[in-house]
Image (cartoon, rainbow, N blue to C red):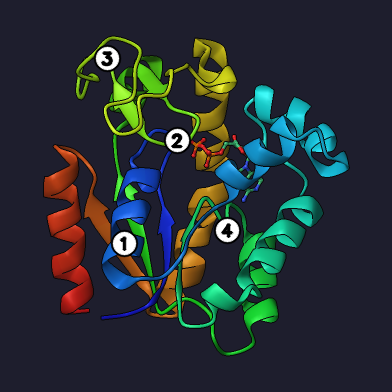
Amino acid sequence: MLRRLVILGPPGGGKGTLAARLAGRLGVPHISTGDMLRNEVAGSSLLGRRAHDYMNAGRLVPNELVTEITNRRLTEPDAGDGWILDGFPRNLTQARALDDALAGLGPQAVVVLEVPDKEVVIRIGGRLTCPRGHVYNLTRSPPRAPGICDIDGEQLHQREDAAHDVVLERIAIYKRATTPVFDYYYNEGLLYRVDGMGAPDEVYGRVIKVLENP
Ligand code: ADP
């Protein structure tokens, strides 16, 4: 199967869940720019301090910061044989920067998870995350014990950018900045649109089907 994949989709669209599963199956790293940025913020690095306000407002962090951490991560040894990129590129400048950085070893397929706005609002509003990145939803996939991660027992919390107005801003920015990236990859023959509604297993099954017969 293909080993260099980009997952695109709206906020709350299920990119992270899908990317983690694909990475496990393929034995390649799951590279999430959102997770990397949140780590930088948690560690109060210079980059994290610069990124924090953009993230809390639901806006895109400046391209040069995100491109820098993504390029750094992609050159680590474990990414030599493939990767699943989740949350990057989010605009045309980033898509071009990725192609430049990878010089011929760019994505082999780009999967767009299609999820309507209404569903996005439900998913993010009830989303709970554990410090290790496991994700739950109060209505769709609640944890067995309230507020506690099933997998590692850590306390769950809501992300800082889950407030309703911030979610609407994230959706608006996705439409404005990220959807033009679809055409970019469509023109390269790499774009696959997949229905992102339904249980994570169903979505995963659809994506595997597409990737096995691209
Ligand atoms: P979601 O897709 O659910 O919004 P992410 O965890 O992917 O969540 O991203 C969270 C935030 O991190 C974004 O709202 C944005 O501020 C920042 N971010 C992540 N990836 C990028 C990127 N490629 N370019 C700019 N900002 C980014």
Q: Residue at x 69, y 78 (%)?
A: 101
Query: Dot 4, crowdedness within 10 Å: few (<14), some or many (≥20)?
Result: many
Between disc 4 and disc 3, the foreground one is: 3
Which element is circle 3 on? loop
Looking at this rendering, what residue extends furthest in the right direction? 46
Q: Tell which circle, 4 or 3, labels the residue nearer the N-terminal end.
A: 4
Q: Which residue is mark 2?
A: 11
Q: Quadrant of residue 110?
A: bottom left
Q: Please, what is the three-letter code of the amino acid marked with disc 1? A: Gly
Q: Please, what is the three-letter code of the amino acid marked with disc 4? A: Pro
Q: Tell which circle, 4 or 2, labels the residue nearer the N-terminal end.
A: 2
Identify the disc placed on residue 24. Answer: 1
- Work out how far the residue at label 4 is from the one at label 2, CA to CA, in angstroms: 14 Å
- Work out how far the residue at label 1 is from the one at label 4, CA to CA, in angstroms: 21 Å
Q: Which residue is mark 4?
A: 89
Q: Which residue is mark 3?
A: 138
Name the quadrant where ligand 1 sits.
top right
Which element is circle 1 on? helix
Q: Is residue 25 left or right of residue 44?
A: left
Q: Tell which circle, 1 or 2, labels the residue nearer the N-terminal end.
A: 2
Q: Tell which circle, 1 or 4, labels the residue nearer the N-terminal end.
A: 1
Between disc 1 and disc 4, the foreground one is: 1
Q: Please, what is the three-letter code of the amino acid marked with disc 2? A: Pro
Callout 2: CB less than 8 Å from ligand 1: yes
Q: Please, what is the three-letter code of the amino acid marked with disc 3? A: Leu
